[in-house]
Structures are given as structure tokens and as C-alpha cells.
């Protein structure tokens, strides 16, 4: 009897160790993203998971991958509860359910990768092929399925490593995700070889392949970084009003809000006019198209400062009895006239609209208080007279296809206006910034960012953050950028690399799942 207990305890100890290893992968992955943003961890984060999966059956590998995903995404996205309760105005229990559902949904991706990788190994498919293809392919699927949520794609963890991220103008962020996934497989093989005391523990061929790809990537990166930027100079003045979210939409505080932005704008342009003055998302907490008193003051300000201005404000459109509400940005000329408007196209679910509200009417009762915005109808560049700009409202900056569409429509500067006050002093503003860095590199255009409470920043076309503010402070950020010129490979082909990985991953999945035929 004692012997049987001993045997059972040993049996149960193995899964426990495996789950701890899987959880360790989740912790390492979470730590690789800002903040703290220990980017080197991404290159080895999956090693514990791969060791845990080892020769386990695919179903157990699925559970281990799911465990990694739960820990990783719970750690990366812990701030979702802040957003859903504050911005979505949901009860905490509903917020917790939304958070849990999102984390569980995202965890399905690493779970599916782990399952298919193990299935593939049983069919003789090398991990060196299957893991990078499946990871990137499913990472890409995550960017568009269910409206898309490409937050914390693997490559974003390297946003400060400039020589590495230059490849984004060819492959997008997915090329770097592929390289990191490949490096994890090589590291796993090395660790496994030494741990099992194999006669030749060092995987020479796979290591050589990784080194060749790394050298090519870094070499290309340094080549791009050393090229001069020749676009026309363009001066920007970015305003961070730091308006408290509790009073932002209070009509009694409109005077104070406009006064703060007026004061900061005059300070920013004290040394001379800027080619573009940028206020954050919803900086004007009223319908700019209708309001007379404050809208007139803002127009006068643009005229006084002799600067074009981007002003975030809600808008609406009427079509008979129907009214569409929009999250917009108005472009003012240097003589104070409205010369354009950009409407947010990709809305925040459970923030600006309720998904499936028409199909499931009871959902509206559960989440009363959420905005009812409509998406913008078209992508169009706006002309400042000195250069075409594309305006990304809030988290539109995390979607590569939108930035690419604006650049292909003629934009030579990307402008991201956002209100990240909902995130509080969490990791989210830093994560948000990290993704917009790639939009600049992918399209080789500068990107400037005005955030209500930070992080306001200037990013050049090589992904270098030339200036940034601190969170929750009034601030102005001024600087000169060079307008983008020419089109990149990424502009032309888009996410072709990701599609190829998805196709390759699909082939791997089909081969892995095929039934064995009798000999």
C-alpha cells in the first residue's frame, strides 16, 4: 500500500512540475513586455513550456500551453479591469468576467500552438519549422478575428532594440515574432541536449540557421539606421492637458479645459509657429462642429499661433431621423478654419460600442452606460499645406493595416491622438506606445502622439523615440521630424509574410492532424 502511494505521488508530481514550468514561461513572457519590458526574456520565454511538453501527449501539451497563456496574458493585461470598470462603467463582477474571458480566449492561441507542435512531432515535423510558423500564423489570426486584438504580439517586446526592428519595413512586426519564436526553439534544443547529457547536445545546424538570420536582420537594421533621412523638415507641438477623467465631460469644467489647452499651446509655440499643433483625443469635450463659444476660441488660437491644429472632439452625422456619433479629430488651418476631419474607424468593444447588441438585446441592459459610437466611413489623408497627415484615434495605432492604408493614401506623417487616462499608472500606456513605434518603421514615416495624460511622444521614421513625456502631468513636447518619402516593401505587400506563415502553419496543422494510414 505504501508502495502504491509512493508510485501515485511520483505520478502526480510530474504534471505539477510541468504546470510550474508552463507558468514560468508565462511569467517570462509577461516580463518581456513593458513594463518592466525586460526584452531579452522573450528570446527564451518558451523554453520552460517546450521542456514541459517534451514527449507529453498533445492533449496535455494543450493544457500546458493554455496555462502559459493564462499566466502571460493575465500579467500583461491586468489593467483591463481598470479600463472596463472606469471606461465601460461595468460592475466589478462583469469586469472580472470580461477580463477572465479575454485572458482565456487569448490563452487558446499558445494552447493550440503547443497541441499542434506536439502532434507535428509525432508525425516527424521538426519543431524548428512548426513552432515559428504556427506561432506567427496564429498571432496574425488574432489580429483580425473577433474585430482583432493584436496587443502584445511577440515582436513588440523588442521595440527599443532599433537594429532589430528595422526589418518591420519588410515583414511588419511578424518577422521579428518569427525570429524570436525560432530562437526559443534553438535555446530549447540546447537546454534539452545538456539536460539529457546527449553525446552532441549542441544543435549546430539550427544554431547556424538562427545566427545567419540574426546577422542578416541586424545587418539590415544597421544599414537602415545609417541611411540619412532626407524628407522635408516639419515642426510639431504636442499638448498633454492632463485633464482628470472625473471632470473631463462635466460641462462646468469646459472653460477650465479649454483654458489649459490654450495656455499650453501658447507656451509650445512661444518661439514661433509650429507646422502642426496637436491636442489629444476628445481634448474638446463638446461637439466642435456645433459649439460656438469654445470652438471659436480654438479657431482663434490656431490663427493667433499661425499653426495648423489637430483637435480631438466627438462629432455626429444626421441622416434623416438617424444620428451617427463619431470619435473624431478636426484639422484647423493656420487661419483658423476647419479644413478636414478624421473619424475613428476601429472602435473599442465594450468601450465605444457593445458587440452583438442587436443580436443579443439583453447585453445592453448588462452594460448600460457604454458609448454608442459608429465607425468612420473612409480612410483619407488630410493636408496641412506642408504635408499630408493620417490621423489614428486612440488604439487605432495598434493596427498595422490602418497606418499602412493612410500612408498608401498619401500620408507622410502619422498622428496618433489618444486618451490613456483610463489605464491609470499601469503598464498599458507603455505597451500602447511600444506598438506605435512599429507603425513608424513599417511605413518609414514619423509618428507623433498626443495623449491626454501621457505618454506623449515623437517617433522618427527609424523607430527612435526622440522625445516623450511622463504620465499624469501637464506637458508640451515640441520637435522637428522629417516627413516620410517613398514607399516601403511593407507598404506595397502588407502582411504578406504573416500570410505566408499562416499558410505554412496551415500545412503543418493539416499534416499533424492527418490520420495515420495502415501499412
Image: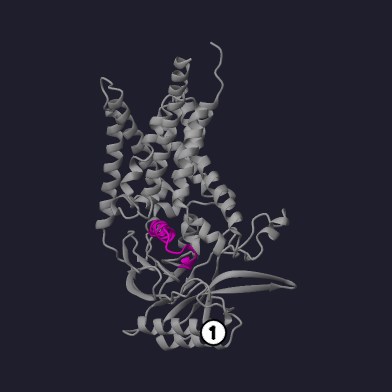
The stretch drawn in magenta includes residue 229: no
Element marked by disc 1: helix
Per the picture, the main secondary structure of the magenta-coloured stretch is helix
Residue 500 position, x and y percent, is 46, 40
Q: What is the crowding at mark 1: few (fewer than 14 residues within 10 Å), some, or many (at least 20)? A: some
Q: Quadrant of residue 11?
A: top left
| Residue at image coords 42%, 42% | 26
Give coordinates of residue 517: x percent, y percent: 56, 16
195 to the left or right of 95: left
Work out whether residue 116 or residue 363 is closer to the camera in this orientation and state it: 363
Q: On the picture, is 491 further left or further right than 290?
A: left
- Residue appearing at x 28%, y 43% in the figure: 216
Residue 147 in sight in this render: no
Vertical side of 250 occupied by 62: above or below: above
Where residue 317 sits: x, y (%)? 65, 73
Kindly indicate the quadrant of the structure image that contains residue 224. bottom left
Q: To which residue does mark 1 refer?
A: 295
How many marks are shown on the rendered structure?
1
Magenta segment boundaries in residue numbering? 417-440
Q: Using the rendered view, name the quadrant where residue 351 is placed.
A: bottom right
Say if the magenta span includes residue 428. yes
Residue 373 point in image, percent of width and height: 62, 66
The single residue placed furthest to the right in the displayed view is 321
Amino acid at each position: 500500500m505504501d508502495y502504491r502511494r509512493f508510485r501515485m505521488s511520483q505520478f502526480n508530481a510530474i504534471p505539477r512540475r510541468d504546470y510550474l514550468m508552463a507558468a514560468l514561461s508565462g511569467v517570462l513572457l509577461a516580463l518581456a513586455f513593458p513594463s518592466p519590458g525586460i526584452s531579452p526574456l522573450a528570446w527564451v520565454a518558451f523554453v520552460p513550456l517546450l521542456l514541459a511538453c517534451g514527449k507529453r501527449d498533445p492533449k496535455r501539451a494543450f493544457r500546458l500551453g493554455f496555462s502559459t497563456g493564462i499566466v502571460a496574458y493575465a500579467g500583461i493585461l491586468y489593467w483591463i479591469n481598470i479600463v472596463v470598470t472606469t471606461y465601460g462603467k461595468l460592475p466589478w463582477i462583469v469586469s472580472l468576467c470580461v477580463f477572465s474571458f479575454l485572458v482565456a480566449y487569448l490563452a487558446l492561441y499558445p494552447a493550440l500552438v503547443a497541441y499542434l507542435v506536439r502532434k507535428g512531432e509525432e508525425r516527424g515535423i521538426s519543431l524548428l519549422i512548426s513552432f515559428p510558423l504556427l506561432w506567427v500564423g496564429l498571432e496574425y489570426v488574432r489580429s483580425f478575428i473577433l474585430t482583432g486584438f493584436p496587443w502584445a504580439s511577440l515582436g513588440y517586446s523588442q521595440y527599443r532594440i532599433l537594429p532589430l526592428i528595422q526589418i518591420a519595413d519588410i515583414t511588419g512586426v511578424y518577422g521579428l515574432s518569427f525570429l524570436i519564436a525560432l530562437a526559443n526553439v534553438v535555446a530549447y534544443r540546447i537546454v534539452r541536449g545538456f539536460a539529457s547529457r546527449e553525446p552532441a547536445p549542441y544543435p549546430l545546424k539550427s544554431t547556424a540557421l538562427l545566427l545567419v538570420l540574426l546577422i542578416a536582420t541586424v545587418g539590415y537594421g544597421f544599414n537602415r539606421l545609417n541611411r540619412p533621412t532626407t524628407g522635408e523638415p516639419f515642426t510639431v507641438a504636442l499638448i498633454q492637458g492632463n485633464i482628470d477623467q472625473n471632470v473631463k465631460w462635466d460641462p462646468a469644467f469646459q472653460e477650465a479645459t479649454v483654458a489649459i489647452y490654450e495656455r499650453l499651446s501658447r507656451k509650445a509655440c512661444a518661439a514661433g509657429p509650429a507646422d502642426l499643433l496637436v491636442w489629444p483625443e476628445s481634448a474638446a469635450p463638446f461637439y466642435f462642429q456645433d459649439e460656438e463659444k469654445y470652438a471659436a476660441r480654438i479657431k482663434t488660437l490656431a490663427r493667433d499661433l499661425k499653426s495648423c491644429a489637430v483637435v480631438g472632439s466627438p462629432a455626429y452625422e444626421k441622416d434623416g431621423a438617424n444620428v451617427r456619433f463619431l470619435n473624431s479629430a478636426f484639422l484647423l488651418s493656420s487661419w483658423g478654419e476647419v479644413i478636414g476631419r478624421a473619424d475613428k474607424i476601429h472602435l473599442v468593444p465594450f468601450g465605444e460600442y457593445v458587440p452583438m447588441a442587436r443580436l443579443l438585446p439583453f447585453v445592453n441592459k448588462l452594460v448600460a452606460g457604454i458609448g454608442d459610437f459608429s465607425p468612420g466611413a473612409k480612410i483619407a489623408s488630410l493636408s496641412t499645406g506642408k504635408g499630408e497627415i493620417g490621423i489614428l484615434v486612440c488604439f487605432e495605432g495598434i493596427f498595422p493595416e490602418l497606418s499602412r492604408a493612410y500612408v498608401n493614401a498619401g500620408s507622410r506623417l502619422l498622428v496618433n491622438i489618444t486618451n490613456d487616462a483610463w489605464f491609470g499608472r499601469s503598464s498599458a500606456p507603455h505597451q500602447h506606445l511600444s506598438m506605435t513605434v512599429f507603425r513608424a518603421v513599417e511605413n518609414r514615416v514619423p509618428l507623433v502622439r498626443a495623449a491626454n495624460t501621457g505618454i506623449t511622444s515623437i517617433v522618427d521614421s527609424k523607430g527612435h523615440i526622440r522625445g516623450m513625456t511622463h504620465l499624469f502631468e501637464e506637458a508640451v513636447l515640441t520637435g522637428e521630424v522629417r516627413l516620410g518619402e517613398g514607399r516601403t516593401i511593407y507598404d506595397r505587400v502588407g502582411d504578406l509574410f504573416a500570410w505566408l506563415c499562416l499558410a505554412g502553419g496551415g500545412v503543418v496543422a493539416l499534416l499533424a492532424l492527418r490520420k495515420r494510414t495502415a501499412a
